[in-house]
Amino acid sequence: MGLATDSVATIIGDRFRRARTATGLRQRDVAARAGVSPTMVCRMELGHGGTVPLDAWAAVAAVLDLDLVPELHEPERSPRGELESRCHALVAEVARDGGWMAAREIVRRSRRHAPDAVETILVRPYRKEIAVVRAWHPVPNVGPALEALEQRRAHLRGTHDSDWVVGALVLCPSTTANRRRVTELAPLLAIALPADASDWIVALRRPRSAMPLPGLLWADRWAVRFRPASRHPGWQRLG
């Protein structure tokens, strides 16, 4: 019996790869310790291990000192912080190719009982660009969320010279509930976050591409990679 879906295999395989490279082990080293073939470890890391038996996954996870069980949950049922954290890790990793430096910060809320916000600040000094990155899972009460985003941009403008450009990016895992909510809010979000998703992907990955206007960028349901913008009616430009 293998994993339930290819999506699950992809996210766990990516975690295996990161953990293995962090320890300096080769695929054949992991395979020998887990009692499986190097080809099987390679398939897992590439996201092609959906049919690999669960006992093989468990053996490799044990070698890498990883907990396999939490990743078997559906993303809609995953803890809020888990998918948000993956979104922040994803944007930081991709943005390195575009010359960005990333720092994750905790924004303390002034209102009583309001939860703190987690954000990533992307900085490209040679272009004098800063981007405030927030992750929405689930999609929140959008009015206050957009207001808080603008307040953070205003704060950063006030702490930098006037020739710096401060942008904003919202990341959203493409779960069923999130897609439905974003579609319902399309008119409002199209005004507040008008940039095409493709423009943001290019700016994150290419050092010479200028940062676009504020925008919304979808990740896949497991927040492993960015997802192309959909073209269904009512939501032409964002995600």
Image (spheres, rainbow, N blue to C red):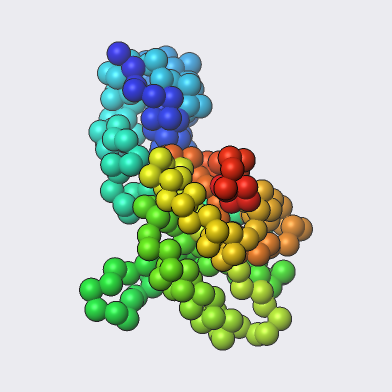
Q: Is residue 131 shown left or right of residue 134?
A: right
Residue at point 68%, 62% (across, down): 212
Residue lying at the far left of the rendered structure: 113
Is the residue 142 above or below the residue 171 in the image? Answer: below
Is the residue 39 above or below the residue 187 in the image? Answer: above
Residue lying at the far right of the rendered structure: 208
Residue at point 41%, 41% (across, down): 175
Number of dots carrying numbers: 0
Question: Residue 2: horizontal and vertical position, in percent?
Answer: 34, 17
Between 195 and 105, the residue placed more toward the observer is: 195
Between 151 and 38, the residue placed more toward the observer is: 151
Q: Is residue 24 shown left or right of residue 233?
A: left
- Which image quarter holds the N terminus? top left
Image quadrant in which you'd find residue 32:
top left
Q: Is residue 36 shown left or right of residue 212?
A: left
Residue at point 24%, 78% (across, down): 112
Image quadrant in which you'd find residue 49:
top left
Between 168 and 16, the residue placed more toward the observer is: 168
Residue at point 30%, 19% (across, down): 54
Is the residue 171 above or below the residue 112 in the image? Answer: above
Question: Residue 66: horizontal and vertical position, in percent?
Answer: 30, 37
Question: Residue 76: horizontal and vertical position, in percent?
Answer: 33, 41
The answer, for residue 36, to whether it is visible in the render is yes
Q: Is residue 158 shown left or right of residue 145?
A: right
The answer, for residue 38, to whether it is visible in the render is no
